[in-house]
Image (tube, rainbow, N blue to C red):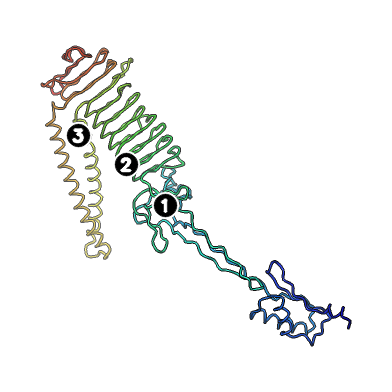
Amino acid sequence: MSSSSEDNLEIEVRIEGDGAVAKVIIPRDFPKQTLDASQLEAVVRQRGVSIDATVEDRLQQIVQAFRDESDQLEHVIAESVPAVNGQDGRLEWVEGFNPATEPRAENTPGDSDAVSYYDRVAYIHVTEGSHVAILHEPTEGKDGRDVTGRTIRARPGKRSDARIDPTFMVDSSGCVIAQADGVLQYNKSVLKLSRLFEVKGYVDFSTGNIDFDGTVNVRQGVRDRFEVKATEDIIVGGLIEAATIRCGRDFACRQGMAAKDRGQLLVGGDANAGYLNGVRGHIQGNLTIRRELINCELVIGGDLICEQGAIIGGSVAVAGSIRAGVLGSPAGTPSVIVLGTGPLLSDHIRKLKGLAKQLREQLQVQKRKFDVLSAAGKNLRPSEKVRLTVLSSEISETEQKLDACGAEHAQVRQTIDGESGSGAVDVRVSKVIHSRVCLRMNNHEVRFDAPLKGPVTIGTDEQDQPQFRKGDGPIQALTKVAKVRNRAA
């Protein structure tokens, strides 16, 4: 055999794919009986392939196959072990707390009624101690190696870009736990709880009703029939239609509220609005109106301030002072303004009557259920005996509430009777009081049959007699410009 032929009978080892695969290629005419595993291993080792138990087994199999006259002359003897990159850190949401989910309806599956889109929830309210997410730490990964034994470095995972506000705690297992009540916010990778819930557009079918423990800021307005309730402040940037607004503290509306005699405004603190039209409600503090108060039925616990605007139509009860530009309208719209603390107490009595009615109805239902169970006597099952005991306790509790309601009603009624003929009156109108305006001042009813130009101040003297003063002029009896009737007579 020539030297050229001998060169052609050399075993070739080929490494491909930058160390991903190692192959051995045996010439077809290579003497079968002279090939052994140690010979192959030496060639493979010389080429730089890392030898391990797997490679040794494959070399043995190749030799056996070649001796058995296999037609396969090219064999894979080794593959690289790829690196396993580490996993990036991430925030995994507990079910029900993912802020990326669509607003959900409050109706539970199985309800017989259709889902109410007024009751959709546009935010995620979190209570203290709630487990909202799991913060997963990044993993290092596992290095690989190529066929020569060279290390293929794994890429370690990156830390999550989520930043956890102190309103949450992350425990040793990565559980993210709320440290207070609030609305869950996850913006620009910052997770926090806020006492402020912001609606970027309108409160409508896209949000559903809002009932939030904190402050609500509505950038646009509130559509018909929707409700916005907050334990703290409510701020609305646009128009409020025939909706219900209820807040525990202050209320502010840049535009106004056109309630169509259906909307309600219930404010625990002060209220400030561009205008109110056809609104019914109760404001514990001061009410400030920049333009008009039209056809409203309101009880105001503080002052009514409408210095540049007009109070037209409806019935407004004010416990404090009144500052207005105009009372009534040139068309002679009937407008009633009640002054003093009596109206507020009367409103409280109406609430107590409503509560007493509910309690009586509740008591009737409880007693009826109690009587049905009692009729079974000794045949009651253990669970029914427990229910009978619970009903007895509930009946006793309802009766106590009813008694307390009656006692409070009597006390408020006594207060109203004791305040007859009392209460400071302070009404200041800068422009005009139109005809058909009625002021109810303690024991007096004052009616204007002709306009009275301002500036004018109305009050009472030490004997509770109505009086007025125009500008810097003298104090005079109000009977000179209006009809005054003694309501106690």
Residue 61 sits in quarter: bottom right
Q: Is 27 placed above or below 174 here?
A: below
Q: CA distance from mark 2 to mark 3?
A: 24 Å
Q: Quadrant of the N terminus?
A: bottom right
Name the one closer to the observer, 76 or 2: 2
**Residue that lies at the very extreme toward the left in this rendered image:** 463
Identify which amino acid the numbered label 3 is placed on. Leu
Q: Residue at x 13, y 24 (%)?
A: 488
Label 1: which secondary element: loop
Q: Residue at x 39, y 35 (%)?
A: 236
Q: Secondary structure at mark 2?
A: loop
First in sequence, mark 2 or 3: give its number.
2
Residue 317's x, y, as percent?
A: 24, 28
Of residues 167 and 224, the one drawn nearer to the viewer in this rendering: 167
Quarter in which the C terminus is drawn: top left
Q: Disc 2 to disc 1, how far (Cα)?
A: 28 Å
**Residue receiving disc 2:** 232
Q: Nearer the viewer, mark 3 or mark 1?
A: 3
C-beta proximity under 8 Å, tags 2 and 1: no
Which mark, residue 187? none
- Residue 455 x, y percent position in the rendering: 25, 15
Q: Is residue 46 rendered to the left or right of residue 168?
A: right
Precedes in sequence: disc 3 or disc 1:
1
Q: Which residue is mark 1?
A: 108
Kindly identify the amino acid type of the residue bearing the numbered disc 1: Thr
Q: Quadrant of residue 426?
A: top left
Classify mark 3: helix, strand or loop.
helix
Q: Is residue 142 above or below residue 417?
A: below
Q: Amino acid at mark 2?
A: Glu
Residue 345 is tagged as 3
Mark 2 or mark 1: name the one nearer the start of the chain.
1
